[in-house]
């Protein structure tokens, strides 16, 4: 198998997984008036804590202008707060509000319940191999 064939298969599998999860979360996104992309942003903030727009953009592989617009929309909905740094007002830090944490907790609880049986049916060695495969791909495909 050549590189392009491999890359295309990885892309296909990732899109399939992401599409399935997006479909499962559609009612929650609709209820909370957020897009799936906004859910993903909230999830990163939930996992990593407060981040600058630049750091959040890097983690999400998004342009800072697009990220800033998304964070502004999330702030208007009461899910995030943006705070300019005193040492440099060009730097904006984004964090979750209590309401943002509640939404992510609810959505994560739903996903955990939905996939618990399938996930628990995998042995630890299989789970470890899956993560190692992704770690290898990250090393292969990124500059880091």
Image: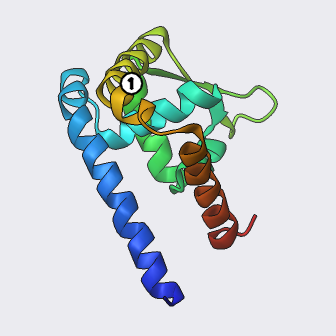
List x then y, in percent, for residue 20.
Answer: 26, 46
Task: Looking at the picture, tell me which residue is in the foreground, 39 or 133.
Answer: 133
| Mark 1 burial class by Cα count in 10 Å: few <14, some 14-19, many 20+ | few
| Element at label 1 | helix
Left or right relative to 104: residue 137: right
Residue 10 versus residue 110 in the image, above or below: below
Q: Is residue 2 left or right of residue 141?
A: left
Residue shown at 37% from the left, 32% from the top:
73
Q: On the rendered structure, is 19 left or right of 132?
A: left
Q: Residue at x 38, y 34 (%)?
A: 39
**Percent coordinates x, y for residue 23 in the rendering:** 21, 41
Give the residue drawn at x 42%, y 20%.
79
Q: Residue at x 59, y 28 (%)?
A: 47
Q: Residue extending furthest bottom?
A: 2
Is 32 rendered above or below residue 118? above
Q: Position of residue 6 (x, y in %)?
A: 47, 79
Q: Is residue 93 visible?
A: no
The tally of labels here is: 1
Q: Residue furthest top?
A: 98
Q: Would you name the residue on which mark 1 appears? A: 112
- Seen from the viewer's position, the closer of residues 68 and 138 is 138
Residue 82, by quadrant, is: top right
The answer to whether residue 119 is visible is yes
Give how far across and how far down residue 63 sits, in percent: 52, 57
Q: How is the image coloured?
A: rainbow
Of the 4 image quadrants, the one containing the C terminus is bottom right
């Amino acid at each position: 198998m050549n590189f392009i064939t491999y890359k295309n298969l990885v892309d296909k599998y990732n899109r399939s997984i992401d599409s399935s999860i997006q479909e499962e979360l559609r009612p929650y996104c609709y209820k909370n008036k957020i897009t799936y992309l906004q859910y993903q942003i909230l999830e990163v903030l939930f996992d990593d804590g407060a981040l600058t727009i630049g750091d959040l953009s890097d983690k999400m592989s998004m342009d800072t202008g697009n990220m800033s617009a998304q964070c502004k929309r999330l702030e208007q909905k009461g899910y995030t707060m943006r705070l300019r740094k005193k040492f440099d007002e060009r730097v904006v830090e984004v964090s979750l509000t209590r309401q943002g944490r509640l939404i992510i907790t609810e959505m994560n609880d739903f996903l955990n319940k939905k996939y618990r049986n399938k996930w628990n049916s995998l042995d630890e060695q299989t789970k470890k191999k899956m993560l190692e495969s992704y770690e290898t791909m990250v090393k292969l495909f990124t500059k880091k």
